[in-house]
Image (cartoon, rainbow, N blue to C red):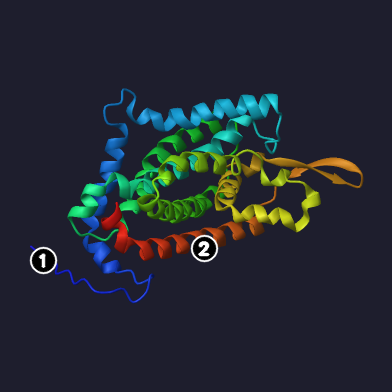
Amino acid sequence: MSEYITVIKPKNSVFDIDWKEIWNYRELFFFLVWRDVKVKYKQTALGALWAIIVPFTQMVIFTVLFGKVAKLPTDGLDPQIFYYSGLILWTYFATAVTFSGNSMVQNRNLLTKIYFPRLIMPTAPAIAAFVDFFIAFVIQIIMMIYFGVLFSWTIIFLPFFILIAFGTAVGAGLVFTSLNVKYRDIGFALPFIVQIWMYASVIVPYSKLPQSWGYFKYLYGLNPMGGAIEGFRWCMLHLNMETTIMKNGILEKVPVEFPWLMISISFISMLLILLFGLWYFRKMEDTFADIV
């Protein structure tokens, strides 16, 4: 049996992360991931079906309110496909951020009794949330077949946009869980913050932002989840997506182009959120056990 000797010493900087130590605690990390998966559906009648029910119910509501009543544009797609394709990635993000943001407070007994790399605790929910995502993704494939939506080879780029969602969830989760230790108001405000963030990411396609905004349209990319969802939809559905533009005084329908600049901004924004989250978490982690 191998033994580990833990030497506790001052950090050289807030980005001084001992990755070897985290690897040595990988069994604890996998335990926390598995526990988060089990606890979420413990003593529920429907179990993992909630991974489908939540985004599917939201899709029905969005289709009725925004697709049928408000008649918002959906890039030429059926509203059901358009909204569901955005909601499954968003539901992953919302679940990861919410559980991560409350992880330190909910695990205060573990936090104050034993030593382990603190970074493990808020990161585990972002991994556990993938279980729900992959279940809901299967329904996305079934819906595409049902509605006759064409597949494309660009689906191979989906992991890149899932990575943007994952990085944003981890970064935001690190910030919220650090704040939540000191200010318990964050735990109450987090669902509201996530709800507002959703409306800024899922409802209106980037291609339908007013042309009069010019380069200000690219500011939409500062919301990394907006870029992640746009790219996710494009990779899955772009053979079926079209938008209307004015050309020589005539309205014409053209295929939706890949918003590479906006998504590039979203990727940079994700990296900044992740780095800030790591910086702030590492700065505050020495006080967690004292005030939690």
* Residue 147 in view, yes or no: no
Q: Secondary structure at mark 1?
A: loop
Q: Residue visible at 18% across and 56% down?
A: 114
The amino acid at mark 2 is: Leu
Above/below status of 11 relative to 248: below
- Please name the residue that numbered disc 2 is placed on: 272
Vertical relation: 265 (above or below) 151: below
Q: Is residue 65 visible?
A: yes
Q: Quadrant of the N terminus?
A: bottom left
Which residue appears farthest toward the right when viewing the image?
Answer: 249
Q: Position of residue 201 (x, y in %)?
A: 59, 44
Which one is nearer the viewer's eye here, 195 or 164?
195
Which quadrant of the figure has residue 237? top right
State the image coordinates of residue 244 (x, y, percent, origin top left): 78, 41
Label 2 residue SS: helix
Q: CA distance from mark 1 to mark 2?
A: 37 Å
The residue carrying pointer 2 sits among few (fewer than 14), some (14 to 19) or many (20 or more) residues within 10 Å by Cα, namely some
Residue 155 location (% of width, % of height): 53, 47
Residue situated in front as seen by the camera: 79 or 107: 107
Mark 1 or mark 2, which is nearer to you? 2
Spot occupied by residue 267 in the image (x, y as percentages of width and height): 55, 59
Q: Residue at x 26, y 44 (%)?
A: 34
In the rendered image, the residue lying farthest to the left is: 1
The kind of residue tagged 1 is Glu
Q: Residue at x 36, y 62 (%)?
A: 284
Q: Which residue is mark 1?
A: 3
Q: Give me the disc on residue 139.
A: none
* Label 1 vs 2, first from the N-terminus: 1
Image point 33% across, 77% down: which residue?
12
Left or right? Give the position of 278 relative to 90: left
The outermost residue toward the bottom is 12
